[in-house]
Amino acid sequence: MQLFAIGINHRTAPVALRERVVFPLEQIKSALQMLRAHWSADHSSSQATAPLAEAAILSTCNRTEIYGAALTDNTSSMHIPIDASYLQCAARWLSAYHRIPVSELAPHLYTHPHSNAVRHAFRVASGLDSMVLGETQILGQLKAAARAALDTGALGVYLNRLFQHSFSAAKEVRGQTQISAHSVSIASAAVRLAQRIFEQWSSQRVLLIGAGTMIEGCATHFAAQHPHTLVIANRTVERGLKLAERVHGTAIALAALPARFHEFDIVVSCTASALPIIGLGAVERALRARKRRPMLMVDLAVPRDIEAEVAQLQDVFLYTLDDLGAAVQKGHAQRQAAATQAEAIIETHVERFMRWMDARRSAPVICKLHNEAHRLRISALLRAQQKLARGEAPKAVLEAFSYALTHTLLHAPTRAFTQMHDDERVRFAQLLDISLEKNPLDA
């Protein structure tokens, strides 16, 4: 059995192409069925691709990947490198499914065979291959992909083991490193800033001014904390309403802000205004109405939305884009340091998984050895029983039985040893010494 991973991600393709190969979660089951049917037909027609025994599809906004386990044997006479044939088959299927020319898609695909596929899966689960280093959302998406494959009957022993190991590796990475502990986006930095100032999110009222990309990111992050109130204020109310609906908030017109400004504990602003939209006087009036309860204000606009003099007020914590930018840079550096630790953890898990793969690969040989040894034992035992039935001395029969059984069992490995090359004999002798030390005959 050979494992492989084939895909396209944010490092190999622009978003314009990535969005064309996305599989909505509800389509993955049917897509897996089509993939296996396509792979089977490809194998039957050309014999260039090994039969696909197991498969799973992971599809997010930043990556679409096929994980597979293919049946292989040592007698296969394929002239094309097996991983190259997989890439060609996957490219043809993705091209047909999404109606994208192969010539347009293939240059952006990558393939990871054998242990590289295992390493890749572990790194993806741990957030080391994500656009945002250390992000945690990908783990849930990988679990959903595994469940979809299981429900379809496409997940077998090998891929199931691979995914379970990837979940364990991700858990250890997050538990033993600081890979996810530091802010690496302006939006997440704003949330962490608020968390340091306000302990109880359930009672906080959040105001986001604007409806552009920066505020959209902040809205998502703040909504995840489940504040008491989340309000979007924008010049165009319709655009504010669309964003508010996505994050289960409410929207108001920017013109209505003066009357409600004092209600909010956290204010994040990012508009395209050429002049400040929040002045010192407005904040002073809000603080009086709040009876000096503190406010966190984050100005992400350039030019600034909030007058700089607001920072001098005693009950206001004002931060600018530069302040949060410094926190993000520090967070990136800290996550990079944690990533080095994470890679070492992942290598340990890869080695452990590959040892399991090797053991699975050896299982048929070991089973055959046991069956043959059992057959030889039965044969020698029958001969001994016949001698006992004829009245021969039990002691002589037992000695003959043990000698014959030992000689018969050692015949095949002894012959194999004599046919080995010198270096193979040395290695075999070393392994034999280790085995005898662990299992002494007089134990």
Image (cartoon, helix red, strand yellow):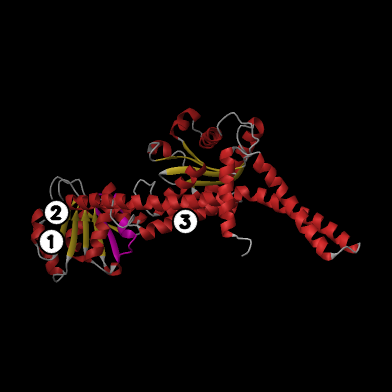
Name the residue located 17 percent from the left edge and 56 percent from the top edge: 319
Please tell me how crowded label 2 is: few (under 14), some (14-19), or many (20+) other residues with Cα within 10 Å: many
Q: Amino acid at mark 3?
A: Phe
According to the picture, the residue beneath numbered tag 1 turns out to be: 283
Please tell me how crowded label 1 is: few (under 14), some (14-19), or many (20+) other residues with Cα within 10 Å: many
According to the picture, the residue beneath numbered tag 3 turns out to be: 167
Badge 1 or badge 2: first in the primary sequence? 1
Q: Are marks 1 and 3 in contact (CB under 8 Å)?
A: no
* Disc 1, SS: helix
The residues colored magenta run 221-240
In the rendered image, the residue lying farthest to the bottom is 291
Quadrant showing the N terminus: top right
- Is residue 396 highlighted in magenta? no
Q: Are marks 1 and 2 in contact (CB under 8 Å)?
A: yes
Badge 1 or badge 3: first in the primary sequence? 3
3 vs 2, front mark = 3
1 vs 3, front mark = 3
Q: Amino acid at mark 2?
A: Ile
Q: CA distance from mark 3 to mark 2?
A: 45 Å
Q: Is residue 104 left or right of residue 223?
A: right
Name the residue located 48 percent from the left edge and 28 percent from the top edge: 103
According to the picture, the residue beneath numbered tag 2 turns out to be: 306
Q: Nearer the viewer, residue 344 or 273?
A: 344
- Is residue 231 highlighted in magenta? yes
Q: Is residue 43 above or below residue 387?
A: above
Q: Is residue 284 left or right of residue 381?
A: left
